[in-house]
Amino acid sequence: MNVAVTKELRSSEEMEARLREIGATRYHNLHPFHKLLHGGKLNKGQVKAWALNRFYYQSSIPIKDAIVISRFRDREIRREWIHRVSDHDGEPGGEGGIDRWLKLTDGLGIDRAYVESTAGILAATRFAVDAYVNFVRDRTPLEAVASSLTELFASGIHEERISGMLEHYDFITDDVMAYFRRRLVQAPRDAGFALEFVKAHAHTPEEREAVCNALIFKTNVLWVQLDALYHAYVDGHIPPGAYVPEEMR
C-alpha cells in the first residue's frame, strides 16, 4: 500500500493534522449509502441488509484487536488494548458490543442464527473485513494501531445515526440503538490512546507517512463495504448467494 503524500511530515503535530484531514475527506459518513440510511431514504429490507453485513465487521473487531495485542512485547500496551476485546465480546455473564449489534438485527426481524452464520453477507464485505484483519497481522505494530484511528471520527457518525434512524424509521426503537450509544463513550477513549501512541512512536517522516497510509487503508475498508451495499441493495445488483430482502424479491 503506497499512497503518495504532498508534503513531508516533519512533526507529530503535522501528522495529526494530516490524520484529521484524512478523516474529514475520506471517512464513510460522507458515503451516499450512509446519507440514505441516516436520512430515512432506505426501506426496511435495505436497512436489514446493512445491519446483516455490518455484523461481520463488528464480530471481527475483537479478532483484530486480539491480533494487535499479540504484536506487542510491552505488557502495558497489551493491558491498555485488551479492554477493546471485552468491549465487543463482553465479560462472562455481561453484554458486549456484539450482543448489542444482535439486538439491532433481532429488532429488525433477522433470524439470529442466520446473522451469526454470515452466510448471506456480500463477498465484498467479507473481502474487505478480512483484509483489515490481515493488515493488522502483517504490517508493523505501529501501522496496526494507526489503522484503528477511524475512531477519532466515530462519535459524529454515531450521533447522526442515532438521531436520524430514530426520527425516520418507525421500526427502529431506542433499545436497538444501544450499540451506538455505548460507542459514544468507548470510541473517544480508544481513539485518544491510539493517537497518543502513534504520535509518540512515529519518529521519522517515513513512519508518519505509514501511519497516515494506515488510516487511509482503514477508511477504504469502511468505504468499500458501503460501495458494495449500494450496488447490491440500492442499484439492485444482488450477487448470487447474498441476502435478498422481501422488498426486493
Image (spheres, rainbow, N blue to C red):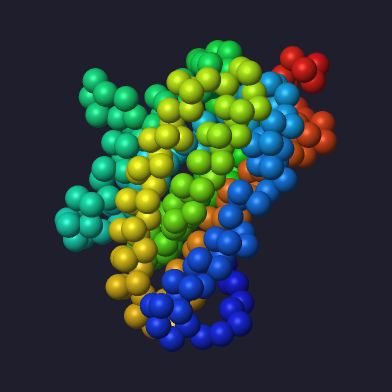
Q: Nearer the viewer, residue 115 or 84?
A: 84
Residue 91 lies left or right of residue 187; in this view the side is left
Q: Quadrant of the C terminus?
A: top right
Q: Nearer the viewer, residue 186 or 94?
A: 186
The quarter holding residue 42 reads top right
Residue 182 visible in rendering: yes
Question: Compared with residue 10, is residue 188 higher up or lower down, i.e. above or below?
Answer: above
Percent of width and height locating residue 192: 34, 58
Residue 121 visible in rendering: no
Q: Nearer the viewer, residue 44 or 98?
A: 44
Percent of width and height locating residue 70: 28, 52
Percent of width and height locating residue 79: 19, 50
Question: Compared with residue 89, is residue 11 higher up or lower down, i.e. above or below?
Answer: below
Residue in view at x 48 percent, y 23 percent:
174
Q: Quadrant of the N terminus?
A: bottom right
Residue 58 lies left or right of residue 161; in this view the side is left
Percent of width and height locating residue 32: 72, 45
Q: Nearer the viewer, residue 227 or 135?
A: 227
How many numbered tags mark residues here? 0
Residue in view at x 59 percent, y 79 percent:
5
Residue 98 lies left or right of residue 45; in this view the side is left
Outermost residue, left direction?
75
Residue in view at x 62 percent, y 62 percent:
25
The quarter holding residue 206 reads bottom left
Question: Compared with residue 213, is residue 207 higher up or lower down, i.e. above or below?
Answer: below
Residue 190 lies left or right of residue 93; in this view the side is right
Residue in view at x 73 percent, y 24 percent:
43
